[in-house]
Image: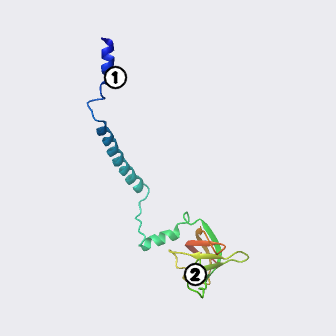
Amino acid sequence: MVGNIIEEKITKPLGNVENPMHIISGVAIAAVILGILTGFILSTKGNNRKVSSLSVGTAKSAQQDTRTFKDFAEGTIKAKPQPEDPSEYTEGTHMLIREGAVPVALTSSVVDLSKYEGKKVKVYGETQKALKEGWLMDIGKVEETK
């Protein structure tokens, strides 16, 4: 009699669910919903400002962000001469001429470097992989120096 009770409990399905696909489907749906909820919470947490790649506000905030642009150099900005052959590959639109050091090729999508041509400046940006130049930097902030 005891053997029959134990055998019945072991072979009896878990709960009233006879099809395990219902459990698997429920778990999958719950995982998707929780994933979406987690993504939404993480995307809004600590990010109270609106971000738009087309807005002028983004360019101004990027210019002030020294945490993003950790690399810096000082010197005088000069326009980079364009090559005679337009198909020739060039890096940067401007050069930062530094006394006693390698010049830095400069490029920027947030700062108009032509406004600083001929001026002594300190530039902040991010070093990029250069193929031709000794140092290529994407500029996010420029400070005029004396």
Q: Say whether marks 2 and 1 touch (CB < 8 Å).
A: no
Counting other residues with Cα less than 10 Å from the Cα at mark 1, is it few (<14), some (14-19), or many (20 or more)? few
All told, the count of numbered labels is 2
Res 127 quadrant in image: bottom right
Residue displayed at 52% across by 76% down: 111
Mark 2 and mark 1 lie on one chain; the one further toward the N terminus is 1
Residue 35 location in percent, x, y? 38, 49
Measure the alpha-carbon separation of dots 2 and 1: 81 Å
Residue type at the position of mark 1 = Ile
Which amino acid is tagged 2? Tyr
- In this image, 19 relative to 146: left or right? left
Mark 2 = which residue?
116
At horizontal 33% and vertical 48% (from top left) the residue drawn is 33
Query: Disc 1 designates what residue?
Result: 10
Residue 4 position, x and y percent, is 30, 15
> Which quadrant of the rendered structure holds the C terminus?
bottom right
